[in-house]
Image (cartoon, helix red, strand yellow):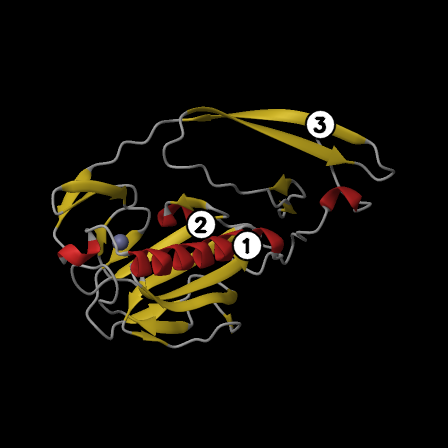
Amino acid sequence: MHFSRDSTGAYVAYAGIPVESHGTLSLPIAVEHPGGAVDSVIVSIPVSSARFGTEQLSVDPRFTEKPDSALAVRIAHEAAAIRVAWEETHHTPQLWHGAFQRPRSSKITSVFGTGREFNGVVQSRHLGLDFDGSIGSTIRASNTGVVTLVGDYYYSGNIVVINHGAGIATAYLHMSKILVALGDTVTRGQLIGLVGATGRVTGPHLHWIAKYGAVSVNPMSLLTVTADPQKAPASRPATRPRGRTRG
Ligand SMILES: [Zn+2]
């Protein structure tokens, strides 16, 4: 977890909880005081079960058949690259500031968490959010960050991942055109690409992903995150002389 200080001086951290979680989440937290003494505390957070619907989709059968070995290698390679992009967020200082914004203002056509049947077979859960759009409609960065992955992937089509730091990433899939390059710093609201129908899709739309490390979170929940790093240094708060610690 990545702690920062809010405008009242309290330490704040955000975390993502996997979609199948329920019951109680136990978080061990160690507070290191100046001088080296360490307090530890286990914080218990109740997690309520979420209910999700299911939906049926029809796609080209080549996307649901068992891939041949060459394609399986490609898919595994792309999945590994994406996993690395998620993990990098935990090794990047907080780059985002202010509120996250929607990448498009259009209608949401599929919500987060829905169970998906492709051609009659349940294959996955929809771990993103779909925005309506026609080919060429604009896609904007949700917040400041660094472009950490750009590719043309089998399932994702043209994909851009933005590393916002402090554990948070957003990804933008199925683009017709990518307008940023690997390593670019982008700011909130910057045009990063155009809506398309590349990869495994039923038609043009934007599939928007939000991650906390490897954990997929509801992108709508990201829109409620408000900590401001201008007032909230992300680095080792317990070692700061004016740090207020609890626990
Ligand atoms: Zn989607």
The span from disc 1 to disc 3 (Cα, nearest Å) is: 25 Å
Q: Which amino acid, by three-letter code, is at mark 2?
A: Lys
The quarter in which the N terminus is drawn is top right
Q: Residue furthest right?
A: 35
Residue at position x 39%, y 54% in the image: 76
**Distance of mark 2 from mark 1, alpha carbons?**
9 Å
Residue 103 seen in the current view: no
Name the residue beneath numbered marker 3: 40
- Helix, strand or loop at label 3? It is strand
Residue 211's label in the rendered image is 2
Residue placed most toward the observer, 64 or 58: 64
User: Residue at horizontal 30%, vertical 45%?
Assistant: 112
As displayed, is residue 182 above or below residue 84? Answer: below
Judge from the rendering whether residue 75 lies leftward or rightward of residue 81; answer left or right. left
Amino acid type at image mark 3: Ser
Mark 2 CB lies closer than 8 A to ligand 1: no
Q: Secondary structure at mark 2?
A: strand
**Quadrant showing the C terminus:** top right
Ligand 1 falls in which quarter? bottom left
* Cβ–Cβ under 8 Å for marks 1 and 3: no
Residue sitting at 42 percent across and 69 percent down?
A: 150
Q: Which residue is mark 1?
A: 89
